[in-house]
Amino acid sequence: MTPKILIAVGAVLAGIGVAAGAFGAHGLSDVLSPARLSVYETAVRYHLIHALALVVTGVLATYVPSVQVAVSGYLFLAGILLFSGSLYLLVLTDTPWLGAVTPVGGAAWIAGWAVLAYGAWKGLP
């Protein structure tokens, strides 16, 4: 992904994360059990953190145009879709088997941070 795409996708996903958080706070607080609402809030929190990570990755890619930086962007995006997406669906559809997908998203984030660290170490002076 180009720096422009990383930043734009990260910004859009951050906006979606804010909307998801507002929906949870105002639309779901009376509908969900406290345990399910807590799961939803975890999805929102990690969604927002990694949307910002995409923006930062885009900025870094401007200075360190490397394969590793681009790959970390893909991994952060995959993590948002798999981790947060599976938790959103699990909570909203009461489909417990989706919980098995969540760790794959978490692993994508861990790999993304590791690849980003390597790319920064290798590419920055």
Image (tube, rainbow, N blue to C red):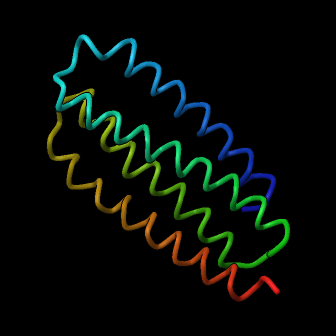
Q: In this view, does 14 lie to the left or right of 97?
A: right
The quarter of the picture where the C terminus appears is bottom right
Q: Where is residue 89 in the image (x, y as percent from the top left)?
A: 30, 35
Q: Where is residue 11 in the image (x, y as percent from the top left)?
A: 68, 40
Q: Is residue 61 left or right of residue 41?
A: right
Q: Quadrant of residue 121?
A: bottom right
The quarter of the picture where the N terminus appears is bottom right
Say above or below: 16 vs 42: above
Q: Where is residue 118 in the image (x, y as percent from the top left)?
A: 61, 84
Residue at x-position 52% and y-position 48%: 49
Q: In which quarter of the image is residue 65?
A: bottom right
Residue at x-position 65% and y-position 46%: 10
Residue at x-position 80% and y-position 75%: 64
Say above or below: 27 vs 93: above
Q: How many marks?
A: 0
Q: Position of residue 94 (x, y in %)?
A: 17, 30
Residue at x-position 58% and y-position 63%: 74
Which of 65/118 is in front? 118
